[in-house]
Amino acid sequence: MEDIYLKPPEAKRSRRARKRERIALVSTHGYVAAEPPLGLPDTGGQVVYVLELAKKLAQLGYAVDIWTRRFEDQPETEKVDDHVQIIRMKCGGKEFIPKEYLYKKLPEWTENALRYIGKKKFKYAFINSHYWDAGLAGQHMAEELDIPHIHTPHSIGSWKQKLMRGDFPDDEQRLEETYNFSRRIHHENTLYRECDMVVATSPIQLDMFKDDYGIDGDKLVMIPPGYDDNRFFQISKASRESIRESMGYAPDAKVISCIGRLARNKGMDLLVDAFAVVARKHDKAILRLAVGSENDQTTEDPMLKELMEKIEAHGIQDRVILSGSLDDPDMPDFYRAADIFCLPSRYEPFGMTAIEAMACGTPTVVTTHGGLFRTLTYGVDALYADSFDAEDFGYTILKALRHPAIHNRLAYGGAHKVRSLFTWTGIAQQLLKVVEGRSTPRLEVTPAG
């Protein structure tokens, strides 16, 4: 490979003083907004990831455009922060389109985006796309603009398919209709070979890109997700007690919390079954669930009905607090008020909520089918349990509830781990190094430092 020769620091500073280089982040599905409505369909951790990454890239000297789909009554552009804006392009009409089927409309989206770029005379240093639908659009854009394309899948089709087949072996046809695995995996195979670099968010993903898709190791890099350390951090015991009181928790209550969408792979049913185990052994334990819906109307979601029926079958109605998803500003205190945070996902590329909870000093239990657990030291940073064994998950929660030494060690160790590995500034710097370190013809760019 040829070496990349960068301009000397003086020249780079002069160039930045004249005009910031631009970066395009492409994330086409869901409700992407400066204040995202987390919990709405296809709107969760990935949206937070893209927004926070954009802000940090701007702080490092770039102008960042977040490209997404325009639907319903959304404005064409929206300012997020200094030097960060959202640009929305129309395709497929005004109705919401699930991410599994959005790819059919993306040729129209890409053509609209390219016309807009030409009109505005934007020049991008590189494109970073997120999830496979945006990857298809980002690859087309990169080829037309002759610029680098770095793709961050977040989720891998082959892995999700395997896990959901194992979880629901009799629902093969329904799973295919819902998640469109065959078309997704086909497009992923093509995308991973055509883009310049693929970003894994965990060691598990690195393995699967190689084993399931045959991607060469020199085309892969691992960059974990980040969290906002200006929002998620530990507080004093007195402040925590005040927050718990404002939320209506009894002083002696042991609160087990979880937040996520009502999707099969999120494992809310597993957590309810696990909590039933906890409730039999600990009379002060309560479960606090904040759930968003795959449907627009949460109360009409059949999965919510199933969850409520399961709670009633266990006879734990008076021990479970069930509500809708939270506004983003409420998230830090939601984590801080809990005694234990759980991530019960059967499939989770990483687990952003677990990282945020650990940063707040809340002992955390995750499953072994998420991308996060291989990064953690059991009993020091967090605990983990089998994602199909409610007894195992329940007794793992009890370990942290019953033993103060374990609880305190996890509170300290988890916060220390995420501070050392997962801040957004470090994530943004790693992404820039990926571009800086590649030597394909389209990757000869001058980073903003």
Image (spheres, rainbow, N blue to C red):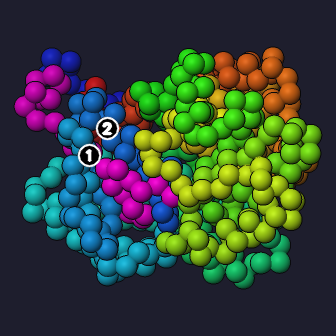
Residue occupying the point 75% across, 30% down = 252
User: Is residue 237 among the parts visible in the rendering?
Assistant: yes
Q: Is residue 349 visible?
A: no
| Quadrant in the rendering for residue 254 | top right
Quadrant of the frame with the C terminus: top left
Gap between marks 2 and 1 measured at Cα: 8 Å
Give percent across and percent down for residue 313.
Answer: 86, 65
Magenta-colored span? 12-39
The 10 Å Cα crowd at callout 2, few under 14, some 14 to 19, many 20 or more, is: many
- Judging by the rendered image, the residue that carries numbered circle 2 is 55
Which is more toward the observer, 322 or 351?
322
* Residue 177, placed above or below residue 119: below
Element type at marker 2? helix
Which residue is label 1 attached to?
80
Left or right: 184, with 254 as reference point = left
Q: Could you tell me which secondary element the residue under label 1 belongs to?
A: strand
Q: Earlier in the sequence, mark 2 or mark 1?
A: 2
Assess whether residue 14 is covered by the magenta stretch: yes
On screen, residue 249 above or below 269:
above
Q: How many marks can you see?
A: 2
Residue 413 spot, x, y in % from top left: 68, 20
Cβ–Cβ under 8 Å for marks 2 and 1: yes
Asked whether residue 245 is drawn in magenta, I would say no
The residue lying toward the viewer, choosing from 74 and 427, is 74
Q: Which quadrant of the figure has residue 105?
A: bottom left
Q: Is 379 or 165 nearer to us in this picture?
A: 379
Image coordinates of residue 227 in percent, x first then y, are 48, 34
Tell me which residue sits at (16%, 64%) in the image: 116
Q: Determine whether, in the image, residue 184 is placed left or right of residue 412.
A: left
Q: Which mark is residue 261?
A: none
